[in-house]
Image (cartoon, rainbow, N blue to C red):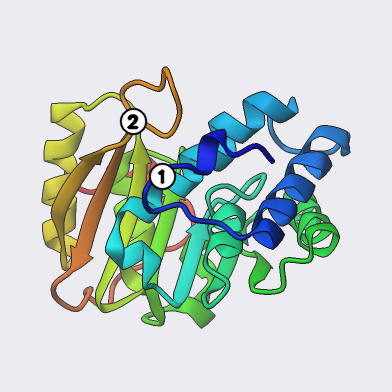
Amino acid sequence: MSASSVSRENVALTDAQRRQLGAVLDVLASDEHAPSAVRERGAAERVHVADSLAALELERVRTARRIADLGSGAGFPGIALAVALPQACVHLIESQRRKREFLVRVCAQAGIGNARPVCARAEEWREGIGRCQLVLARALASQPVVLEYAAPLLELGGALVDWRGRRDREEEQRAERAAALLGLERSEVRRVVPFAGATDRHLHVFEKRAETPRRFPRRAGVARKHPLGG
């Protein structure tokens, strides 16, 4: 892995970590079942790895120990942050078995022992309820839906980091209404530039200020069909 995407202030990786991320990129490029349209090594380093590591600008990401990546897919941001944060335990929550099997292969081939692929929907991962310091979501669903997935998993004082592109005020207003129902509050929207030429990339941070009502999570699929905050 080149140094170009890891030269920012808060992304200081060891040679061993760089090799691990390089191994991740190798698997992504060579595995015919890799669940991503961006697989070429150079593009994937920028679009996936650098974009994931941008979250290290946030102190609460750097200090988190119990992390869940929802809808992990090809493993980003969860796998990249597991490499960068070896002291953390990162659960990769993926409902599709084939994608979960890909995550298992990546972790094995790159030697990433602190990432735990889990085949479950976010709404049905009961083992995680109230136990996560940090929840991650990248290109998963509309923001009100992501908030409903994340809130029950967070401990009080924990946070969600939601990767978004260009800001959408109407969606943000719906998300704020949904957050109020879930015990969450938006604390920051951080614009990031993970690589040269990247535009309209934002990290939305929501903190859990109050306990999430016991009626959440609703049963699987309901959050997408009937999102909060409408």
* Helix, strand or loop under label 2: loop
Q: Nearer the viewer, residue 9 or 178?
A: 9
Drawn side of residue 79 relative to residue 106, left or right: left
Instruction: Measure the alpha-carbon separation of dots 2 and 1.
Output: 10 Å
Q: Is residue 35 above or below residue 146?
A: above
Drawn side of residue 79 relative to residue 124, left or right: right
Q: Position of residue 110 (x, y in %)?
A: 79, 58
Q: Residue at coordinates 69% horizontally, 32% vertically from top-left?
A: 36
**Residue 164 in sight here:** yes
Q: Residue at coordinates 29% horizontally, 63% vertically from top-left?
A: 59
Q: Nearer the viewer, residue 230 or 205?
A: 205
Q: Quadrant of residue 105?
A: bottom right
Q: Which residue is mark 2?
A: 201
Looking at the picture, which amino acid does disc 1 mark?
Ala
Q: Is residue 166 above or below residue 222?
A: above
Drawn side of residue 45 relative to residue 125, left or right: right
Q: Position of residue 117 (x, y in %)?
A: 68, 65
Looking at the picture, which amino acid does disc 2 mark?
Arg
Q: Is residue 156 above or below residue 162?
A: below
Q: Quadrant of the C terminus?
A: top left
Q: Nearer the viewer, residue 214 or 151?
A: 151
Q: Quadrant of residue 101?
A: bottom right
Q: Which residue is mark 1?
A: 54
Q: Nearer the viewer, mark 2 or mark 1?
A: 1
Mark toward the start of the polypeptide (2 vs 1): 1
- Specify few, some or many for label 1: CA neighbours under 10 Å numbering under 14, 14-19, or 20 or more: many
Q: Position of residue 19 (x, y in %)?
A: 74, 53
